[in-house]
């Protein structure tokens, strides 16, 4: 990426990769995750450390070389990662060994690469930010997206009733096949009115919003008193200004804006989240991969994600 902007800022570059530093591992990547945070960084909404930059914060592959101080991994191990540093859009890369987790047998590289960032985010939301308990009712915006499908399944396993907004009948069916209790097609139905109807006027305990804009504002009226709204993205391109008085005392709401990177940068949180994620995958958590494109088609992957033209996760193939 040569500068912030549209997908035309991407250019393929051939570079020599040095031997891993003492605490690093060289990873020959087999699958690379594409996420909205990549788009935010490309557009300049989230700054990158320097230019030119290689985007990408999620992937999986095979250990190709190890630094002199690395004891946890060997050449040939299958591993995955999510989080900083940037640099995932590459055939191979060097990473701190502390960032890597071994992929259990029975889970393929594509599933691991598609699950890491969204799965860790789901653990952060469900376990840390506002723990989900038996009997809660939660609202998931973009329930057919990569994060939405994971949140739906995991929240159901915790005993919640899950309502989700989707953009089409096909996406509604996909979300239902992943455990969604009630799908609201937001282009045809007022989601606030439908949430109120489904909850007998009570509203939901927790709402997860990765859309931003007017969706986040309107979600205030879909909440139960003392409910929690968790903002996890801005797919609409903007985050609204919300006056404190809009949250309470009339509505008595909490609003959170947690950071995946802050969570994943803490070693203890990262270890707990990845262990919980692989446990869920071992128990049958389904990961929907909506598209796999060659690494050289990163621009197409960004456009598909921005336009909502796919479901689940998008991967790049090195």
Image (tube, grey):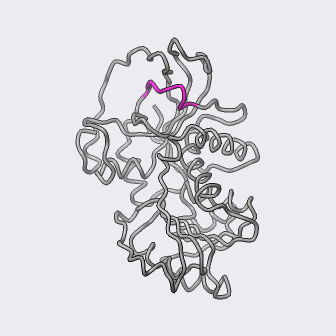
Q: What stretch of residues is rendered in magenta?
A: 91-100
Q: Where is 133 relative to 248, above or below?
A: above
Residue that protrudes farthest toward the front in the picture = 249
Q: Where is 83 relative to 187, above or below?
A: above
Depth order, front residue of 156/7? 156
Quadrant location of the N terminus? top left
- Residue 227 position, x and y percent, is 59, 74
- Residue 72 position, x and y percent, is 62, 21
- Residue 299 position, x and y percent, is 34, 45
Image quarter of residue 295: top left
Quadrant location of the C terminus? top left
Residue that protrudes farthest toward the top in the picture = 68
Question: Which residue: 45% across, 72% down?
Answer: 216
Q: Assess whether residue 220 is covered by the magenta stretch.
A: no
- Residue 204 position, x and y percent, is 62, 76
Q: Where is 87 relative to 257, above or below?
A: above
Image quarter of residue 140: bottom right
Question: Which residue: 35% across, 63% down?
Answer: 237
């Amino acid at each position: 990426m040569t500068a912030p902007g549209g997908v035309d800022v991407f250019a393929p570059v051939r570079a020599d990769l040095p031997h891993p530093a003492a605490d690093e591992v060289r990873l020959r990547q087999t699958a690379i995750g594409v996420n909205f945070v990549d788009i935010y960084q490309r557009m300049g909404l989230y700054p990158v450390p320097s230019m030119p930059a290689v985007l990408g914060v999620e992937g999986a592959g095979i250990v190709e070389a190890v630094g002199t101080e690395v004891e946890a991994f060997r050449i040939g191990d299958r591993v995955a990662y999510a989080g900083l540093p940037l640099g995932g859009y590459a055939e191979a890369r060097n990473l701190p060994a502390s960032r890597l987790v071994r992929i259990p047998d029975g889970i393929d590289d594509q599933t691991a690469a598609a699950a890491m960032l969204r799965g860790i985010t789901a653990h952060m939301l469900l376990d840390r930010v506002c723990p989900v308990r038996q009997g809660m009712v939660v609202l998931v915006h973009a329930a057919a997206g990569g994060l939405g499908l994971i949140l739906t399944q995991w929240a159901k396993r915790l005993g919640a009733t899950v309502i989700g907004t989707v953009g089409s009948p096909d996406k509604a069916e996909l979300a239902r096949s992943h455990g969604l209790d009630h799908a609201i097609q937001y282009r045809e139905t007022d989601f606030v009115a439908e949430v109120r109807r489904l909850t007998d006027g009570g509203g939901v305990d927790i709402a997860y919003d990765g859309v931003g804009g007017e969706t986040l504002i309107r979600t205030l009226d879909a909440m139960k008193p003392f409910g929690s709204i968790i903002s996890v993205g801005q797919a609409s391109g903007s985050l609204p200004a919300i006056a404190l008085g809009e949250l309470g005392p009339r509505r008595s709401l909490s609003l959170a804006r947690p950071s995946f990177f802050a969570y994943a940068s803490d070693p203890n949180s990262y270890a707990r989240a990845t262990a919980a994620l692989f446990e869920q995958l071992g128990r049958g958590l389904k990961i929907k991969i909506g598209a796999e494109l060659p690494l050289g088609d990163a621009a197409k992957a960004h456009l598909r994600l921005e336009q909502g033209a796919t479901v689940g996760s998008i991967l790049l193939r090195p």
